[in-house]
Amino acid sequence: MKDSEFDSYPLSKVGPPRHDHAPLIRSRLLARLETRASLLLIVAPAGSGKTALLASWVGAQPNTHFIWYSLDAGDREPSRLVDGLAAAADHALPGAGVATRQALARGGNAFAAISILLAHIEQTPGTVLILDDCHHLDGVRSAEGVIEQLVRQRPAGLKLVLAGRTPPLVPAIAAVAAGTLVTLGGTELQFTTDEASALLASHGLEQEATPSLLRAGQGWAMGLLLLAYGETGHISYVHQPTSALATYLLTQIVDLLPDDLRVFLMESVLLGPFSAQEADHILDRQDSEACINAILRQGLFVEWQPDGQQHIIRYHNLFAETLAASLRKEQPERFLAIHARAATARAADPMRMLEHVVAMGDPDRLLTVLEELLPRQQFL
């Protein structure tokens, strides 16, 4: 079979993205990528700069052979995934994927074909294989089996990079964690002040508001850019659910979640810091702990910390404020009902109760609550 008879793949799948502006060089993170470790795992929320970081790494190493493959939902079928990987290998190392694609075209098994591909890649030591957007395979065991085979059978001269919004459920990753695995997460990818200034400058944006934007976005790259494009540092912008920031968060993150998890997320952001037990009670659920675990796995702008026998969950400010504004607009009755239940449930904590009463926007109830609390001198 001739190369021209194979399915073709767009450059956007078999090569790093190209931008009009100069790439941002984040030296502290590039140093982590250039480690001698043979397996790199990058897991962070959407818009954290994962792809941009990897693309800048490719651009900074012109003498290194990079095989780049961007995954999508179509790659959940193992043969399609392996064929795409072979096409990407051909793009970087002409001829490296031909035998693999021929084997697949003859009806060969995807897992046997991946061994053929790795044997050809092994002939070029020092190659880096980057799989971006691995979250598209989340929960698809057959496709994750291909990734597991790559992890287990990668030749000594190959560095494998897996990047996505969620960590791949590949047992082999845990098996090689000692000494050969380097991970970068959302915390490491948060922008420093200098990096944020450089990012804004690369997009031709003013840098005077960098500190306030960085605080508002908590180091999140996309939040920083959208805030800067939107209102040059006026943080009230995040309260507008029709803004570009709200659109990004809702369409690129929230709307892609399973229905039940999306409902939990939209409602629980109203609670401020909360435990699973509180969420169950206030939201009238029985699965808050499972939802929290799913959110943590998704890396959805959330922090958690131990508090006695339970954990306290806290969403990042931008995320929580944007989703709360959206719920208030789309479901005002539910918005008010949750705050009312939360105020009642937290009556023993006056300051937290007041937060919910204020959010309800009911001056009469606020006055009543203040009249009840002031004699108790809770605000001194």
Image (cartoon, rainbow, N blue to C red):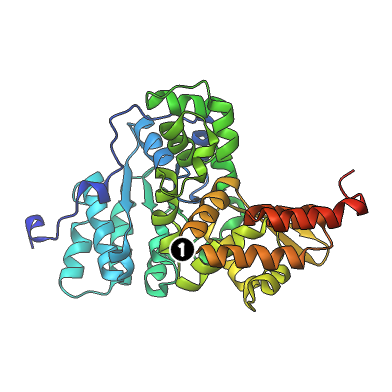
**Compared to 297, does 209 lie above or below?**
above
In the rendered image, which quarter contains the C terminus? top right
Q: Residue furthest front?
A: 364
Q: Residue furthest right?
A: 376
Residue 267 is drawn in which quadrant?
bottom right
In the rendered image, which quarter contains the N terminus? bottom left
Is residue 221 in sight in this rendering? yes
Q: Please state if 108 lies on the left or on the right of 377 as rendered.
A: left
Q: Could you say where residue 334 lies in the image, as x and y percent from the top left?
A: 55, 67
Q: Which residue position is annotated with label 1?
A: 152
Type of amino acid at the residue the image marks with label 1: Arg
Residue 342 is drawn in which quadrant?
bottom right
**Compared to 206, does 216 lie above or below?**
below
Q: Please state if 197 lies on the left or on the right of 88 as rendered.
A: right
Q: Could you say where residue 121 lies in the image, as x and y percent from the top left?
A: 31, 52
Q: Residue at x 59, y 70 (%)?
A: 291
Front position in the image: 182 or 26: 26
Q: Residue at x 70, y 74 (%)?
A: 281
Q: Could you say where residue 80 lies in the image, as x and y percent from the top left?
A: 25, 66
Front position in the image: 165 or 123: 165
Q: Secondary structure at mark 1?
A: helix
Answer few, some or many: residues within 10 Å of disc 1's Cα (few below 14, many 20 plus, some between 14 and 19): some
Q: Could you say where residue 336 lies in the image, as x and y percent from the top left?
A: 60, 63
